[in-house]
Image (cartoon, rainbow, N blue to C red):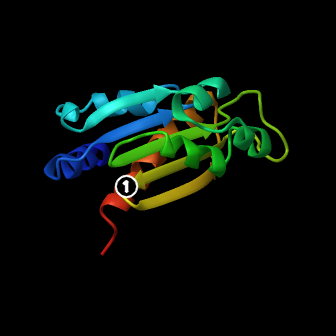
């Protein structure tokens, strides 16, 4: 994927780092990064925080945030981003299905957050398709969102 390559090259040229915290994508974001030759120049870690307990213990997400807003929320994803310590960060949490959705957060709801230095973007998507389609769409959108933050359109 050219987008991932562009992200890696951008960060490497500046001697900056990248990490990810993912839930519903289960490691797909990290897998896509390490599939690119040279990723080791920038990529430091990928945390699969599938359980809420891992979000709190490993990433420092306050349990009160998850209780109040849910694991699939901008507030939780923002806290996941804060738990990472690199220049560029990606966090993803969602409901890939086939079960687990609700009227307020149907299957396909995915919150993606990216941070680069002092800039942050957060977006909630409602992807369609089966579990794999939702997860793959979330990965693509996460990289597109980070790339747009790194290299804003002129």
Q: Is residue 119 above or below residue 3?
A: below
Seen as rendered, the residue at the extreme bottom is: 154
Please state, as top left, top right, bottom left or bottom right, where the C terminus lies in the image: bottom left
Give the residue at the far right of this rendering: 103
Describe the element under mark 1 as helix, strand or loop.
strand
Dot 1 alpha-carbon crowd within 10 angstroms: few under 14, some 14 to 19, many 20 or more: some
Q: Which residue is mark 1?
A: 116
Establish if 1 lies above or below 27.
below
The residue lying at 50 percent from left, 46 percent from top is 82
State the image quarter where residue 93 is shown.
top right
Query: Which residue is drawn at the image coordinates 29% and 28% (left, top)?
Result: 34
Q: Nearer the viewer, residue 113 or 78?
A: 78
Left or right: 144 with respect to 91?
A: left
Residue 98 lies, in percent from the top left, at: 72, 27
Q: Position of residue 142 (x, y in %)?
A: 46, 46
- Measured as percent of width and height from the top left, residue 4 is found at 30, 43
Depth check: 81 or 28 in front? Answer: 81
Q: Quadrant of the N terminus?
A: top left
Q: Position of residue 57 (x, y in %)?
A: 58, 26
User: Above or below — where is 119 with respect to 146?
Assistant: below
For this orientation, the residue located farthest to the left is 13
Q: Indicate left or right for 30 with 80 as reference.
A: left
Q: Residue at x 17, y 33 (%)?
A: 38
Query: Total label count?
Result: 1
Answer with left or right where residue 132 lies relative to residue 5.
Answer: right
50 to the left or right of 95? left
């Amino acid at each position: 994927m050219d987008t991932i390559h562009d992200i890696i090259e951008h960060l490497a040229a500046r001697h900056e780092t990248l990490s990810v915290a993912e839930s519903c994508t289960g490691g797909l974001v990290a897998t896509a990064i390490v599939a690119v030759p040279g990723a080791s120049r920038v990529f430091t870690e990928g945390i699969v925080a599938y359980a809420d307990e891992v979000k709190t213990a490993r990433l420092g997400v306050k349990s009160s945030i998850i209780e109040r807003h849910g694991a699939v929320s901008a507030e939780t994803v923002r806290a996941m981003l804060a738990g990472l310590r690199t220049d560029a960060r990606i966090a993803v949490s969602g409901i890939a299905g086939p079960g687990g959705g609700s009227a307020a957060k149907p299957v396909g709801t995915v919150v993606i957050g990216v941070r680069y230095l002092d800039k942050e973007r957060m977006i909630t998507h409602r992807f369609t398709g089966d579990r794999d389609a939702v997860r793959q769409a979330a990965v693509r959108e996460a990289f597109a969102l980070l790339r747009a933050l790194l290299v804003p359109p002129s």
